[in-house]
Every structure is written in C-alpha cells, then in structure tokens.
Image: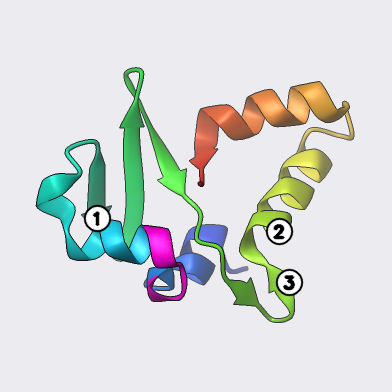
Amino acid sequence: GTTFEEIIRNRYNGDKFLSNIAANLRHYKNFTVNKGLITLRDNGREVLCVPDVVIDGSNAREIVINEAHSMLAHLGGSKTLAYLRDHVWWK
C-alpha cells in the first residue's frame, strides 16, 4: 500500500505556511526538506510536517488523526494526541 509520506510528498505548495518555509529554508533553521518531505527538529526529535491540503476529498491532517487513532486501537484522545505530538507537526 501507499504510505502517508508518499501521499503528502511534494504537496506542500498547497499549504501557505509550509510552502513559505520550503521556499525560504535558510530562514528556518529547525526545518529540513528531504525527498519532498518537510521535517521539523523539535526537542531532539524530528517530526513530519503535515500540510493543510485535501487528498482524495479528505484533509491530510484528518487522515493522520484517524490513522493514529486506529493504529492505537482506539485508546482515546489523550494517547492519540501524545502519539501525534511525537511524530507529526502542523501550524
């Protein structure tokens, strides 16, 4: 199957904030672009930046939240939020 990274690769131009970061990377020391993905270094870890774009009728951020919730076997909002904080970022 297709991974989430493959789905959002090179899709940042649809997100006003993240496309600005990609275009002006030298001004954003904590961000990196690698193979079409933007990551943020935060508190010693690297997290994937999720653009605010629609993919096949669903917002990419909603897809991430739903996948995390399902992956964690529906353990609840606080565990899902903690997992998301450790792996993804958006503004």
The spot of residue 62 in percent (x, y) is 73, 57
Dot 3: element: strand
Question: Does 69 appear above or below 41?
Answer: below
Residue in the foreground of this view, choosing between 88 and 28: 28
Amino acid beneath label 1:
Val
What residue is shown with label 1?
A: 33
Looking at the rendered structure, the kind of residue marked 2 is Ile
Mark closest to the chain's N terminus, 1 or 3: 1
How many angstroms separate mark 1 from mark 3 (CA)? 24 Å
Q: Secondary structure at mark 2?
A: helix
* Disc 1 element: strand
Q: Is residue 32 left or right of residue 77?
A: left
Residue 56 appears in the rendering: yes
Which SS type dominates the magenta stretch? helix
Res. 52 mark: none
The image shows residue 81 at horizontal and vertical percentages of 71, 29
Disc 1 + disc 3, Cβ < 8 Å: no
Mark 2–mark 3 CB contact (< 8 Å): yes
On screen, residue 9 above or below 44: below
Q: CA distance from mark 2 to mark 3?
A: 7 Å
Q: Earlier in the sequence, mark 2 or mark 3?
A: 3
Amino acid at pointer 3: Ser
Camera-nearest residue between 69 and 73: 69
Q: Hey, which residue is sitting farthest left in the picture?
A: 26
Magenta segment range? 13-17
Look at the numbered discs 1 and 2 and tell me whether their residues touch, using CB distance below 8 Å. no
- Residue on which disc 2 sits: 63
Sort mark 1 into few (<14), some (14-19) or many (20+) by Cα contacts within 10 Å.
some
Residue 71 coordinates in the image, percent (x, y) = 76, 40
Q: Which residue is mark 3?
A: 58
